[in-house]
Image (tube, rainbow, N blue to C red):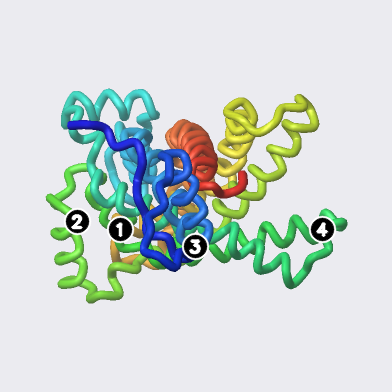
Amino acid sequence: MPTIEVLPIESLSSENNSRTYLSKTEVFKHVKSSSSDHPIIIELITSGLSVSIANLITLPIDVLKVRLQLANAAMTTSQSAIKAGLIETTKTVYQKEGIRAFYSGFTPAILRGLFYGGVRLGAYGPIKNMLKRLASDDNKSSIVFVRNITAGCLSGSLAAITSNPMDLCKTKLQTKNTIYKSSAHVIKDVIQQYGVKGLWVGTVPAAFRTAVLTATQCVTYDHAKRLWIELTGWGEGVKLHLGASLITGLVTTTVTAPLDTIKTNMYAAGKYGFSEVTNKIVHKEGFRGLLRGWSAAYVRLGPQTIVIFIVMEKLRQFSGLSAL
Protein backbone atom coordinates (compact mmCIF):
# COMPACT_ATOMS: atom_id res chain seq x y z
CA MET A 1 0.00 0.00 0.00
CA PRO A 2 1.55 3.40 -0.96
CA THR A 3 2.39 5.87 1.77
CA ILE A 4 0.34 9.06 1.85
CA GLU A 5 2.64 12.01 2.45
CA VAL A 6 0.08 14.83 2.51
CA LEU A 7 -3.44 15.12 3.85
CA PRO A 8 -6.10 17.39 2.32
CA ILE A 9 -8.34 19.52 4.50
CA GLU A 10 -11.02 21.91 3.36
CA SER A 11 -10.00 25.55 3.56
CA LEU A 12 -12.37 27.54 5.75
CA SER A 13 -11.33 30.91 4.41
CA SER A 14 -11.31 30.24 0.71
CA GLU A 15 -14.13 31.67 -1.44
CA ASN A 16 -13.64 28.99 -4.02
CA ASN A 17 -13.87 25.40 -2.88
CA SER A 18 -10.11 24.81 -3.00
CA ARG A 19 -8.16 22.40 -0.81
CA THR A 20 -5.14 23.06 1.37
CA TYR A 21 -2.51 20.39 1.87
CA LEU A 22 -0.65 19.86 5.14
CA SER A 23 2.52 17.88 5.67
CA LYS A 24 2.67 15.16 8.33
CA THR A 25 4.50 17.52 10.67
CA GLU A 26 1.85 20.21 10.24
CA VAL A 27 -0.94 17.68 10.83
CA PHE A 28 0.75 16.54 14.07
CA LYS A 29 1.09 20.16 15.21
CA HIS A 30 -2.58 20.74 14.33
CA VAL A 31 -3.64 17.76 16.51
CA LYS A 32 -1.48 18.93 19.41
CA SER A 33 -2.82 22.47 19.21
CA SER A 34 -6.42 21.23 19.14
CA SER A 35 -5.77 19.21 22.33
CA SER A 36 -4.83 22.41 24.09
CA ASP A 37 -8.48 23.50 23.76
CA HIS A 38 -9.35 20.82 26.35
CA PRO A 39 -6.42 20.85 28.83
CA ILE A 40 -8.38 19.28 31.71
CA ILE A 41 -9.34 16.26 29.57
CA ILE A 42 -5.72 15.84 28.46
CA GLU A 43 -4.59 16.15 32.11
CA LEU A 44 -6.98 13.35 33.11
CA ILE A 45 -5.95 11.07 30.23
CA THR A 46 -2.18 11.47 30.70
CA SER A 47 -2.47 10.97 34.47
CA GLY A 48 -4.77 7.96 34.16
CA LEU A 49 -2.54 6.23 31.62
CA SER A 50 0.61 6.82 33.67
CA VAL A 51 -0.96 5.37 36.83
CA SER A 52 -2.38 2.36 34.93
CA ILE A 53 1.04 1.57 33.47
CA ALA A 54 2.60 1.89 36.93
CA ASN A 55 -0.12 -0.36 38.43
CA LEU A 56 0.54 -3.01 35.79
CA ILE A 57 4.29 -3.02 36.45
CA THR A 58 3.95 -3.12 40.26
CA LEU A 59 0.88 -5.41 40.54
CA PRO A 60 2.83 -8.43 41.91
CA ILE A 61 4.23 -6.28 44.72
CA ASP A 62 0.74 -4.92 45.40
CA VAL A 63 -0.52 -8.48 45.91
CA LEU A 64 2.28 -9.11 48.43
CA LYS A 65 1.48 -5.84 50.21
CA VAL A 66 -2.16 -6.86 50.65
CA ARG A 67 -1.17 -10.32 51.94
CA LEU A 68 1.23 -8.79 54.49
CA GLN A 69 -1.28 -6.19 55.65
CA LEU A 70 -3.92 -8.87 56.26
CA ALA A 71 -1.50 -11.17 58.12
CA ASN A 72 -2.18 -9.51 61.47
CA ALA A 73 -3.45 -10.97 64.73
CA ALA A 74 -6.85 -9.34 64.24
CA MET A 75 -7.44 -11.14 60.92
CA THR A 76 -5.67 -14.50 61.28
CA THR A 77 -4.51 -16.96 63.91
CA SER A 78 -1.71 -18.36 61.76
CA GLN A 79 1.54 -17.54 63.54
CA SER A 80 3.59 -18.42 60.45
CA ALA A 81 1.64 -15.90 58.37
CA ILE A 82 1.92 -13.25 61.08
CA LYS A 83 5.69 -13.67 61.36
CA ALA A 84 6.34 -13.96 57.62
CA GLY A 85 8.17 -11.12 55.95
CA LEU A 86 8.22 -9.96 52.34
CA ILE A 87 10.63 -12.62 51.02
CA GLU A 88 8.95 -15.51 52.85
CA THR A 89 5.50 -14.37 51.73
CA THR A 90 6.74 -14.19 48.13
CA LYS A 91 7.99 -17.78 48.32
CA THR A 92 4.76 -19.03 49.90
CA VAL A 93 2.52 -17.40 47.30
CA TYR A 94 4.63 -18.74 44.43
CA GLN A 95 4.88 -22.29 45.81
CA LYS A 96 1.21 -22.66 46.80
CA GLU A 97 -0.60 -20.56 44.21
CA GLY A 98 1.74 -20.16 41.27
CA ILE A 99 2.78 -17.14 39.22
CA ARG A 100 -0.83 -16.24 38.31
CA ALA A 101 -1.54 -15.28 41.92
CA PHE A 102 0.81 -12.31 41.57
CA TYR A 103 -1.55 -10.84 38.97
CA SER A 104 -4.76 -11.24 40.97
CA GLY A 105 -7.05 -8.26 40.57
CA PHE A 106 -5.50 -7.35 37.21
CA THR A 107 -8.64 -5.88 35.61
CA PRO A 108 -9.79 -3.68 38.54
CA ALA A 109 -6.19 -2.56 39.07
CA ILE A 110 -5.97 -1.25 35.51
CA LEU A 111 -9.44 0.33 35.58
CA ARG A 112 -8.74 1.86 38.98
CA GLY A 113 -5.53 3.33 37.59
CA LEU A 114 -7.42 5.04 34.78
CA PHE A 115 -10.14 6.55 36.98
CA TYR A 116 -8.32 6.95 40.28
CA GLY A 117 -5.05 8.08 38.72
CA GLY A 118 -6.76 10.32 36.22
CA VAL A 119 -8.74 12.20 38.85
CA ARG A 120 -6.10 12.13 41.61
CA LEU A 121 -3.22 13.52 39.59
CA GLY A 122 -5.11 14.97 36.64
CA ALA A 123 -7.26 17.21 38.81
CA TYR A 124 -4.30 18.36 40.91
CA GLY A 125 -3.01 20.83 38.31
CA PRO A 126 -6.38 22.43 37.47
CA ILE A 127 -7.33 22.73 41.17
CA LYS A 128 -3.93 24.24 41.94
CA ASN A 129 -4.39 26.79 39.15
CA MET A 130 -7.90 27.62 40.42
CA LEU A 131 -6.55 28.20 43.93
CA LYS A 132 -3.73 30.26 42.43
CA ARG A 133 -6.29 32.72 41.09
CA LEU A 134 -7.75 33.04 44.58
CA ALA A 135 -4.34 33.53 46.25
CA SER A 136 -1.90 34.67 43.59
CA ASP A 137 0.97 35.90 45.78
CA ASP A 138 3.72 33.53 44.59
CA ASN A 139 6.38 35.55 46.38
CA LYS A 140 5.36 33.97 49.70
CA SER A 141 6.53 30.34 49.83
CA SER A 142 4.06 29.56 52.61
CA ILE A 143 1.12 30.46 50.36
CA VAL A 144 2.45 28.28 47.55
CA PHE A 145 2.99 25.37 49.95
CA VAL A 146 -0.50 25.54 51.49
CA ARG A 147 -2.07 25.94 48.06
CA ASN A 148 -0.32 22.81 46.77
CA ILE A 149 -1.28 20.82 49.87
CA THR A 150 -4.94 21.87 49.53
CA ALA A 151 -5.05 20.97 45.84
CA GLY A 152 -3.55 17.57 46.58
CA CYS A 153 -6.02 16.80 49.36
CA LEU A 154 -9.05 17.83 47.29
CA SER A 155 -8.06 15.89 44.17
CA GLY A 156 -7.01 12.86 46.23
CA SER A 157 -10.22 12.66 48.24
CA LEU A 158 -12.34 13.02 45.11
CA ALA A 159 -10.39 10.22 43.40
CA ALA A 160 -10.72 7.84 46.36
CA ILE A 161 -14.48 8.30 46.65
CA THR A 162 -15.19 7.76 42.95
CA SER A 163 -12.89 4.74 42.54
CA ASN A 164 -13.58 2.96 45.87
CA PRO A 165 -15.63 0.08 44.33
CA MET A 166 -12.72 -0.79 42.00
CA ASP A 167 -10.24 -0.68 44.87
CA LEU A 168 -12.55 -2.93 46.90
CA CYS A 169 -12.75 -5.45 44.04
CA LYS A 170 -8.99 -5.45 43.58
CA THR A 171 -8.30 -6.12 47.26
CA LYS A 172 -10.89 -8.90 47.61
CA LEU A 173 -9.45 -10.65 44.53
CA GLN A 174 -5.93 -10.41 45.97
CA THR A 175 -6.67 -11.88 49.41
CA LYS A 176 -5.47 -15.35 50.37
CA ASN A 177 -7.93 -18.18 49.54
CA THR A 178 -10.35 -15.72 47.96
CA ILE A 179 -13.75 -17.08 46.96
CA TYR A 180 -14.12 -14.53 44.17
CA LYS A 181 -13.50 -15.20 40.50
CA SER A 182 -14.01 -11.74 39.00
CA SER A 183 -14.90 -8.14 39.79
CA ALA A 184 -18.52 -8.84 38.80
CA HIS A 185 -18.61 -11.66 41.35
CA VAL A 186 -17.32 -9.31 44.07
CA ILE A 187 -19.82 -6.57 43.25
CA LYS A 188 -22.78 -9.00 43.14
CA ASP A 189 -21.85 -10.58 46.48
CA VAL A 190 -21.19 -7.28 48.26
CA ILE A 191 -24.51 -5.79 47.11
CA GLN A 192 -26.39 -8.93 48.22
CA GLN A 193 -24.81 -8.80 51.69
CA TYR A 194 -24.55 -5.08 52.41
CA GLY A 195 -26.45 -3.27 49.67
CA VAL A 196 -24.96 -0.74 47.24
CA LYS A 197 -23.42 1.19 50.13
CA GLY A 198 -21.20 -1.85 50.76
CA LEU A 199 -19.20 -0.92 47.65
CA TRP A 200 -18.05 2.17 49.51
CA VAL A 201 -16.86 0.43 52.68
CA GLY A 202 -13.42 1.74 53.61
CA THR A 203 -14.03 5.07 51.92
CA VAL A 204 -13.00 7.07 55.01
CA PRO A 205 -9.43 5.69 55.32
CA ALA A 206 -9.19 5.50 51.53
CA ALA A 207 -10.07 9.19 51.19
CA PHE A 208 -7.74 10.22 54.02
CA ARG A 209 -4.95 8.03 52.65
CA THR A 210 -5.35 9.32 49.11
CA ALA A 211 -5.53 12.93 50.29
CA VAL A 212 -2.31 12.48 52.26
CA LEU A 213 -0.71 10.47 49.44
CA THR A 214 -1.56 13.01 46.76
CA ALA A 215 -0.58 15.99 48.87
CA THR A 216 2.78 14.50 49.85
CA GLN A 217 3.39 12.98 46.41
CA CYS A 218 2.61 16.06 44.36
CA VAL A 219 4.00 18.63 46.78
CA THR A 220 7.14 16.62 47.54
CA TYR A 221 7.68 16.08 43.83
CA ASP A 222 7.34 19.81 43.16
CA HIS A 223 9.87 20.71 45.85
CA ALA A 224 12.15 17.74 45.11
CA LYS A 225 12.44 18.91 41.51
CA ARG A 226 13.43 22.40 42.65
CA LEU A 227 15.95 20.90 45.08
CA TRP A 228 17.55 18.72 42.41
CA ILE A 229 17.72 21.68 40.01
CA GLU A 230 19.43 23.83 42.66
CA LEU A 231 21.90 21.07 43.59
CA THR A 232 22.72 19.76 40.12
CA GLY A 233 21.67 22.45 37.66
CA TRP A 234 19.84 19.80 35.64
CA GLY A 235 17.04 20.84 33.30
CA GLU A 236 13.88 18.89 32.48
CA GLY A 237 14.74 15.29 31.64
CA VAL A 238 14.76 11.69 32.88
CA LYS A 239 17.61 12.28 35.38
CA LEU A 240 15.73 15.11 37.09
CA HIS A 241 12.43 13.20 37.11
CA LEU A 242 14.13 10.06 38.50
CA GLY A 243 15.87 11.94 41.32
CA ALA A 244 12.69 13.75 42.36
CA SER A 245 10.67 10.52 42.18
CA LEU A 246 13.08 8.65 44.49
CA ILE A 247 12.65 11.25 47.22
CA THR A 248 8.88 11.39 46.69
CA GLY A 249 8.45 7.61 46.94
CA LEU A 250 10.26 7.41 50.28
CA VAL A 251 8.18 10.19 51.85
CA THR A 252 4.79 8.97 50.61
CA THR A 253 5.37 5.35 51.66
CA THR A 254 6.12 6.29 55.26
CA VAL A 255 3.30 8.80 55.65
CA THR A 256 0.51 6.65 54.18
CA ALA A 257 1.37 3.18 55.56
CA PRO A 258 -1.00 3.18 58.61
CA LEU A 259 -4.02 4.40 56.62
CA ASP A 260 -3.29 1.92 53.84
CA THR A 261 -3.24 -0.98 56.32
CA ILE A 262 -6.56 0.09 57.88
CA LYS A 263 -8.15 0.49 54.44
CA THR A 264 -7.05 -2.97 53.28
CA ASN A 265 -8.38 -4.65 56.44
CA MET A 266 -11.73 -2.86 56.08
CA TYR A 267 -12.02 -4.04 52.49
CA ALA A 268 -11.29 -7.63 53.49
CA ALA A 269 -13.56 -7.71 56.56
CA GLY A 270 -16.44 -5.83 54.97
CA LYS A 271 -18.40 -5.25 58.18
CA TYR A 272 -16.10 -3.24 60.46
CA GLY A 273 -15.79 0.53 60.63
CA PHE A 274 -12.67 2.67 60.65
CA SER A 275 -12.30 2.96 64.43
CA GLU A 276 -13.21 -0.68 65.03
CA VAL A 277 -10.56 -2.01 62.64
CA THR A 278 -7.97 0.39 64.03
CA ASN A 279 -8.72 -0.65 67.61
CA LYS A 280 -8.55 -4.36 66.74
CA ILE A 281 -5.14 -4.03 65.12
CA VAL A 282 -3.67 -1.78 67.81
CA HIS A 283 -5.12 -3.94 70.61
CA LYS A 284 -3.63 -7.14 69.17
CA GLU A 285 -0.28 -5.88 67.90
CA GLY A 286 0.20 -2.31 69.07
CA PHE A 287 0.89 0.60 66.75
CA ARG A 288 3.48 -1.51 64.93
CA GLY A 289 0.55 -3.46 63.47
CA LEU A 290 -0.46 -0.38 61.50
CA LEU A 291 2.87 -0.54 59.69
CA ARG A 292 2.37 -4.09 58.42
CA GLY A 293 3.36 -4.42 54.80
CA TRP A 294 5.57 -1.31 54.96
CA SER A 295 8.43 -3.12 53.21
CA ALA A 296 6.20 -4.20 50.31
CA ALA A 297 4.57 -0.77 50.22
CA TYR A 298 7.98 0.87 49.98
CA VAL A 299 9.22 -1.58 47.35
CA ARG A 300 6.02 -0.96 45.39
CA LEU A 301 5.44 2.75 45.88
CA GLY A 302 9.02 3.75 45.13
CA PRO A 303 9.10 2.21 41.61
CA GLN A 304 5.43 3.09 41.10
CA THR A 305 6.08 6.76 41.84
CA ILE A 306 9.08 6.74 39.52
CA VAL A 307 7.08 5.15 36.68
CA ILE A 308 4.07 7.44 37.22
CA PHE A 309 5.99 10.69 37.02
CA ILE A 310 8.45 9.68 34.29
CA VAL A 311 5.65 8.34 32.07
CA MET A 312 3.44 11.32 32.88
CA GLU A 313 6.16 13.83 32.04
CA LYS A 314 6.68 12.10 28.69
CA LEU A 315 2.94 11.96 27.94
CA ARG A 316 2.56 15.62 28.90
CA GLN A 317 5.44 16.54 26.62
CA PHE A 318 3.92 14.48 23.78
CA SER A 319 0.47 16.05 24.24
CA GLY A 320 1.79 19.61 24.42
CA LEU A 321 1.21 20.20 28.14
CA SER A 322 3.75 21.98 30.31
CA ALA A 323 6.00 19.99 32.67
CA LEU A 324 4.73 19.38 36.19
Q: In this view, does 133 lie to the left or right of 281?
A: right
Mark 2 residue type: Ser
Q: How far apart are the alpha carbons under marks 3 and 2?
A: 32 Å
Q: How far apart are the alpha carbons under marks 4 and 3?
A: 26 Å
Q: Mark 3 points at which residue?
A: 38
Towards the viewer: 109 or 242: 242
Mark 4 residue type: Asp
Q: Give the residue drawn at x 37%, y 40%.
A: 53
Q: In this view, does 285 lie above or below 101?
A: below
Q: Name the residue under label 4.
A: 138
Q: Is residue 243 left or right of residue 54?
A: right
Towards the viewer: 1 or 49: 1
Marker disc for residue 183 = 2
Give neighbour class at mark 2: few <14, some 14-19, many 20+ (Cα, 10 Å).
many
Of marks 4 and 3, which one's residue comes earlier in the chain? Answer: 3
Towards the viewer: 75 or 122: 122
Whether residue 82 is visible to the viewer of this picture, yes or no, is no
Of marks 3 and 2, which one's residue comes earlier in the chain? Answer: 3
Q: Give the residue drawn at x 22%, y 31%.
A: 2
Q: How far apart are the alpha carbons under marks 2 and 1?
A: 8 Å
